[in-house]
Image: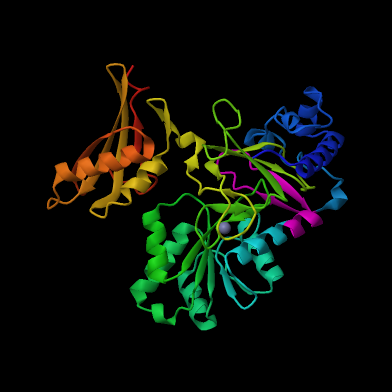
Amino acid sequence: MQISEKQLAQVNDRIQALIKADNFYGKKLKEACITELKTPEDFLKLPFSEKKDLRDAYPLGLMTPPEEDIVRIHSSSGTTGTPVIIPYTRKDVEDWATMFTRCYETAGITNKDRIQITPGYGLWTAGIGFQAGAEKLGAMVIPMGPGNTDKQIEMMTSLGSTVICATSSYALLLAEEIQKRGIRDKIKLKKGVIGSERWSKKMRDRIANELGIELYDIYGLTEIYGPGIGINCQNETGMHYWDDYIYLEIIDPKTGEPVPDGEQGEIVITTLVKEGAPLIRYRTHDLSRIIPEKCSCGRTYPRIDVIMGRTDDMMKIKGVNVFPSQIEEVLGTFPEISSEYQIRISHLDGKDTMRIYVETTGDVDFNDLTKRIAERVKSRIGFTPIVKAVEVGVLPRSMKKTARVIDERFSEE
Ligand code: ZN
């Protein structure tokens, strides 16, 4: 999706601010001798920014306006090395709330709703973002923060919360707990707004069915305001994003070149009006695609597909880019197999081979099942894998993140 004239003017404005601040991106601009963009082609000459640039700017190197304009900072969790500190001006905080309000409205949530917020507050951008948007909408906020499931359920039943905001894992835990206690008739929930980590359709359906609610995926990252820069509408066909605040590109993660609309690649975001820490062509490492068609809901905000994973998950097999999420999605359509699977990729006789191991019970015809799975995977990714079925419990289990993809092509030499 080509950058519009208005967006280009906004980027030019940010470029001036960054050069003046002389921070990491201001320096990049100087090195590239860029002071102004005249055409959409010029935009593509702008250098990317990376998480590492942001880490190197710790603590306040991203601050672009004078310090008296900064009203708040947020920080990414920093599980891997130095955290990233993002400064916000008053306008940034307000803009973020406006975007978040738009997310709630897109989900059909109104000022008559009671919104229970379970993501964390504090340095993390989640809780406070959900709250500011809900208050701006005029809804009643129940600011729980994470954990304490007993208290969550008590407040949910006595206050009659109609909306739950949560991560997908916590939403599942709550759904299971409500089912276990047999109190679904005491719950008034209608909608769930879920932070858009990648989750399988099996998990999504389970939460939706057990709580009897509609689910909305909200998108965002701390570096770019936080959650709230996009959400799906009732049609559940990807997520609308707010192109008056961000310009979003999809690039080939290997070459850095933009891909045509509709093709998968890495999401790269430019903030158009952010003051505290404007970011230009920031590589998110999230994988998705622009959905080129107009949404039948009538909204003109552009759409991206649900997040398919991270660039580090991508596998190139037989010249085709394959994401584990695509395989997982296909496997999710077979009720006779368990949620566990394993993908092994090897290189034999000059050819890439993909084997998929799935688990099922003994009363299923293994040959017939594996044939049907292979056909359905082929129609999704374009080539036929070798599918092998094993008894339930045979594949390795892990308390943490299970390694589901094993690429033997690089380890055999
Ligand atoms: Zn729509």
Left or right of 114 in this view: 70: right
Q: Quadrant of residue 27?
A: top right
Which segment is the magenta one? 71-95
Residue 191 seen anywhere in this rendered image of the structure: yes
Where is residue 25 shown, x and y percent of the image? 76, 33
Task: Give the residue drawn at x 84%, y 45%.
Answer: 65
243 within the magenta span: no
Query: Can residue 395 be seen by looking at this rendering?
Result: no
Q: Quadrant of residue 257?
A: top right
Judge left or right: residue 105 versus residue 66.
left
**Position above or below: 346 against 110:** above
Taking 376 as reference, is 242 above or below it? below
In depth, the one of 383 and 157 nearer the eye is 383
Q: Quadrant of the C terminus?
A: top left
Q: Is residue 324 left or right of residue 192?
A: left
Q: How are the colours assigned in the image? A: rainbow
Image coordinates for residue 178, horizontal then vertical, percent: 39, 73
Q: Nearer the viewer, residue 2 or 319?
A: 2
The residue sitting at 76% across, 38% down in the picture is 61
- Image-based side of 34 in relation to 269, left or right: right
In magenta segment, residue 93: yes
- Figure disc tally: 0
Ligand 1's quadrant is: bottom right
Q: Is residue 133 above or below residue 401?
A: below
Q: Quadrant of the N terminus?
A: top right
| Residue at screen point 54% across, 27% down | 254
56, 139: nearer the viewer: 139
Residue 245, percent from left and from top: 72, 50
Q: Position of residue 316 (x, y in %)?
A: 42, 28
User: Which residue sits at x=52%, y=42%?
Assistant: 288
